[in-house]
């Protein structure tokens, strides 16, 4: 019998993560054009980010049991089709919702975010179920395609807007809808594996009470906040907070972040077998705290740009690395664990950037009384710096939890060792 080749499946998963990068990163790139065209506030932009990831949380939770019951294919095919529809609806907002454009953006965001949540739920367990070893390598490489997708979306969208103007964003939204549409047909034919432990799956209650899962949930939540806050706000920060031309800020700031995010995941995928993923996440969280502070407080533009890019490599494994650790320690958790951890990551990824938007607007309003002038800044610049500075709390929290998670694993190993020693004593003559 000829062995099944899962290369088309792996390729489709890579493209799927690319599509998810479109869903998450396209809107923040056009925040300033939308602000100039419709007068939206930063709090409204924060709400769009919040809705994006909150909808993904709900999709993660709502479909997890159904995926375990009915398999991957119907959901992964539907997710890509829904993603294409949502992006097309986003492009059509000026035509379909004249005068109430923000309502249209909310509806379109919910549609493609539901698709993004399904992709997040499905792609990791699809890779995890493919026969073979080196799951950490495969997972890291797949998640690196999210970063390469982010870089591509930033470069193409920014150049398009630079060449054709801020009001040309609907055309580029339609262009991006082609990617998930094509992948719909790839997943319709790609072979999909399913793990053989369905009868031994952990119960949800048992999973929720497991110490490793609890720590992993909060670790991925703060990891998601650490990654997405910088990713979503770097474009606006560089353009308005640092007064850089949009094309320069996007290319060196947001694009630099995405490039380093992908580089970190690619390097770990290639050479990570010799390195503890826990140690990488602890060190990455620590350096990310420093980078956030440098971006927010540095008076030098070049240092803020450099710190923004370096944040990408620092947080690159906080999401996929946590999935790898949890999957290794809880092999019988099934798709439900991936769904709940994805939900945790999405909670962090929604609340973190939203709080940044709220804090930015608050500081902007308060500093208009004269604080900003004393610091030789506009109120908007001071507000954006304060919002980014808040983000330093997220990798700091991730650092603390990853230290706790490593200690939890060490205690488990120690306990198992004690049991082995006790058994050895019992069998001695």
Image: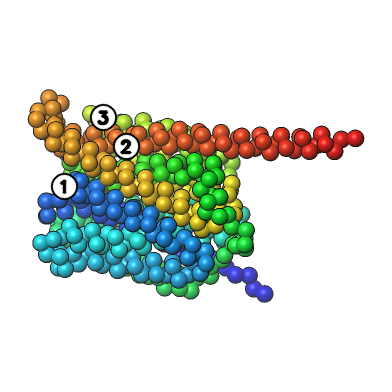
Task: Report the mark closest to the observer, 3 or 1.
Answer: 1
Residue matched to label 2: 391
Please say if 133 is above or below 215: below
- Quarter of the image with the C terminus is top right
Residue matched to label 3: 297
- Give the image's coloring scheme: rainbow
Mark 1 and mark 2: span between their CA atoms? Answer: 19 Å
- Where residue 17 sits in the image (x, y, percent)? 41, 58
Q: Which residue is found at the position 37% from the left and 45% from the top? A: 348
Q: Which residue is found at the position 19% from the left and 45% from the top? A: 42
Query: Relative to residue 108, is residue 6 drawn left or right?
Result: right
- Where residue 343 sits in the image (x, y, percent)? 41, 52
- Where residue 82 sits in the image (x, y, percent)? 34, 68
Please say if 351 is above or below 157: above
Q: Pointers 3 and 2 in contact (CB under 8 A)?
A: no
Query: Relative to residue 223, is residue 329 drawn left or right?
Result: right
- Quarter of the image with the N terminus is bottom right
Query: Relative to residue 104, is residue 70 drawn left or right?
Result: right
Q: Earlier in the sequence, mark 3 or mark 1?
A: 1
- What secondary structure is marked by label 3? helix
Image quadrant where residue 422 sits = top right
Disc 2 packing (10 Å; few <14; some 14–19; many ≥20): many
Q: Which residue is found at the position 39% from the left and 70% from the top? A: 78
Q: Pointers 3 and 1 in contact (CB under 8 A)?
A: no
Query: Relative to residue 33, is residue 88 drawn left or right?
Result: right
Mark 3 and mark 2: span between their CA atoms? Answer: 12 Å
Residue matched to label 1: 41
- Where residue 414 sits in the image (x, y, percent)? 66, 34
Q: Residue furthest top?
A: 374
Q: Nearer the viewer, residue 426 or 394?
A: 426
Q: Nearer the viewer, residue 330 or 306?
A: 330
């Amino acid at each position: 019998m000829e062995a099944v080749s899962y290369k088309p499946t792996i390729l489709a998963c890579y493209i799927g993560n690319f599509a998810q990068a479109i869903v998450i990163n396209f809107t923040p790139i056009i925040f300033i054009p939308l602000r100039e065209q419709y007068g939206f506030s930063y709090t409204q932009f924060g709400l769009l980010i919040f809705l994006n990831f909150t909808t993904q949380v709900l999709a993660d939770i709502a479909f997890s049991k159904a995926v375990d019951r009915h398999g991957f294919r119907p959901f992964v095919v539907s997710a890509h089709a829904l993603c294409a529809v949502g992006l097309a609806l986003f492009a059509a907002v000026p035509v379909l919702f004249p005068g109430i454009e923000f309502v249209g953006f909310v509806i379109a965001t919910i549609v493609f975010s539901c698709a993004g949540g399904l992709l997040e739920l499905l792609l990791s367990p699809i890779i995890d179920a493919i026969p073979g070893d080196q799951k950490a390598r495969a997972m890291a490489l797949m998640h690196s395609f999210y970063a390469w997708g982010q870089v591509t979306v930033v470069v193409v969208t920014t150049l398009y807007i630079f060449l054709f103007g801020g009001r040309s964003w609907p055309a580029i939204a339609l262009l991006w809808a082609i990617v998930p549409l094509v992948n719909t047909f790839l997943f319709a034919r790609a072979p999909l594996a399913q793990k053989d432990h369905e009868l031994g799956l952990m119960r949800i209650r048992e999973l929720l009470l497991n110490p490793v899962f609890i720590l992993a949930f909060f670790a991925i939540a703060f990891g998601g906040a650490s990654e997405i806050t910088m990713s979503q706000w770097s474009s606006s920060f560089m353009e308005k907070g640092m007064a850089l031309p949009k094309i320069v800020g996007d290319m060196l700031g947001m694009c630099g972040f995405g490039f380093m995010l992908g580089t970190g995941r690619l390097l770990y995928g290639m050479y990570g077998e010799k390195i503890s993923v826990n140690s990488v996440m602890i060190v990455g969280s620590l350096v990310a705290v420093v980078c956030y502070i440098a971006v927010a407080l540095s008076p030098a533009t070049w240092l803020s740009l450099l710190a923004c890019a370096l944040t990408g490599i620092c947080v690159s494994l906080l999401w996929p690395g946590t999935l790898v650790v949890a999957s290794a320690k809880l092999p019988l958790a099934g798709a439900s664990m991936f769904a709940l951890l994805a939900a945790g990551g999405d909670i962090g990824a929604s609340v973190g950037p939203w709080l940044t938007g709220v804090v930015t607007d608050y500081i902007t309003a308060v500093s208009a009384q004269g604080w900003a002038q004393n610091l030789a800044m506009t109120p908007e610049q001071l507000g954006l710096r304060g919002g980014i500075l808040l983000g330093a709390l997220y990798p700091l929290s991730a650092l603390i939890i990853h230290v706790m998670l490593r200690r939890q694993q060490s205690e488990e190993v120690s306990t198992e060792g004690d049991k082995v020693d006790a058994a050895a004593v019992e069998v001695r003559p």
